[in-house]
Image (cartoon, helix red, strand yellow):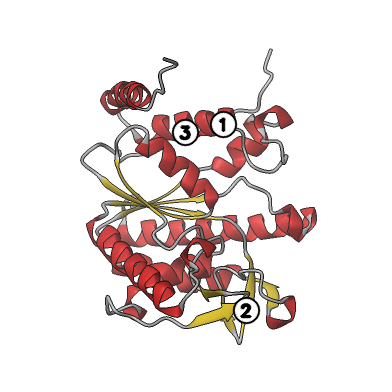
Amino acid sequence: MKLQTIVDIKPSEWKIGYEDKILLLGSCFSDEIGAQMQQRYMQVTCNPFGTLYNPLSIAQAINLQIFNSSNCKLPLVEYDGLWHSMAHHGSFSRSTKEEAEEAVNESIVAMQKALNEATVVIVTFGTAWVYEMNGDVVGNCHKLPEKLFTRRRLSVEEIVAAWRPILEQYKDKHWIFTVSPIRHIKDGLHENQLSKATLLMAVEELGNTENRVQNTERISYFPSYEILLDELRDYRFYADDLVHPSSLAVSYIWERFEDTFCTNQTKNELVLQHKRWKHEHHIPLH
């Protein structure tokens, strides 16, 4: 008797090991997977700009041509007693402009270093819905007044156009794309489905085009979205908000990731290192 619809994932031709330096970018699902890697002592850098959700903001963070100086001055906005970078997560907001500039510049240096050293880049798209301020897509609205923004949904063509030059520029890296299984229910359930479909089609177009041109599997898609919605189709696999995956779901998706991108030898080492991490982070009762 079959009680699940299992997502069939073809094992990757290339594998991830402890020798790889890995950069994770995108939605909070990247943070979840990054945490799994950190708990196994892999070489990981996760979201130097903070959590970003839409493909254009993630592309902007990668597109280091516009950040060609470690002392770059990004536009900052003052609101409600804080200075905010519209390209960064709220964790980079500070009480003074100078402090915000320092935090932003440090993130740029961290991004440059991580991107230059990375052999694998994992990108998680969260939503195709974006907010524009003065005609520019922002990475975070920072709770500024709604009247300052225009909300719209990106097209497949826009996403592909933003990402194709990046993939062309960084041919020396393996890229793994995934679509976050976290539903953006504030957009509305139907709008969320349209958004996820747009992201899936864009990733499919990027992978098909680049792999065909390079005649190699340089770009992979990992179906985290499908695993949670199809294999784990039960609210016991969700957190209390019924939107984010539970820790059990994250662990299951991580195991599927291991099966796809790791050799048996690496998987054995991951188990040993995770035991070591749990031992080192154990808080004794007495």
Which residue is label 3 attached to?
Answer: 254
| Picture layout, residue 122 above or below residue 19 | below
**Count of residue discs:** 3
Q: What kind of residue is marked 3? A: Trp
Q: CA distance from mark 2 to mark 3?
A: 34 Å
Distance between the Cα atoms at labels 2 and 1? 34 Å
Q: Amino acid at mark 2?
A: Glu
Q: Nearer the viewer, mark 1 or mark 3?
A: 1
Question: How far from the left and from the top, in percent, is residue 54?
Answer: 56, 64
Tell me what residue is drawn at x 70 percent, y 32 percent.
233
Name the one closer to the observer, 155 or 96: 96
Residue 96 spot, x, y in % from top left: 46, 76
**Is 242 left or right of 45, judged from the image as shown?**
right
Is 114 above or below relative to 241?
A: below
Q: Which quadrant does the N terminus fall into?
A: top right
Give the structural element (helix, strand or loop) at label 2. strand
Could you say which quadrant of the image residue 201 lies in?
A: bottom right
Say the numbered circle drawn on residue 106: none
**Hey, which residue is sitting farthest front in the picture?**
286
Q: Which residue is mark 2?
A: 132
User: In terms of sequence position, does the residue under pointer 1 or pointer 3 come before the other?
Assistant: 1
Label number found at residue 247 = 1
| Residue 159: percent from left, percent from top | 53, 69
Give the quadrant of residue 163.
bottom left
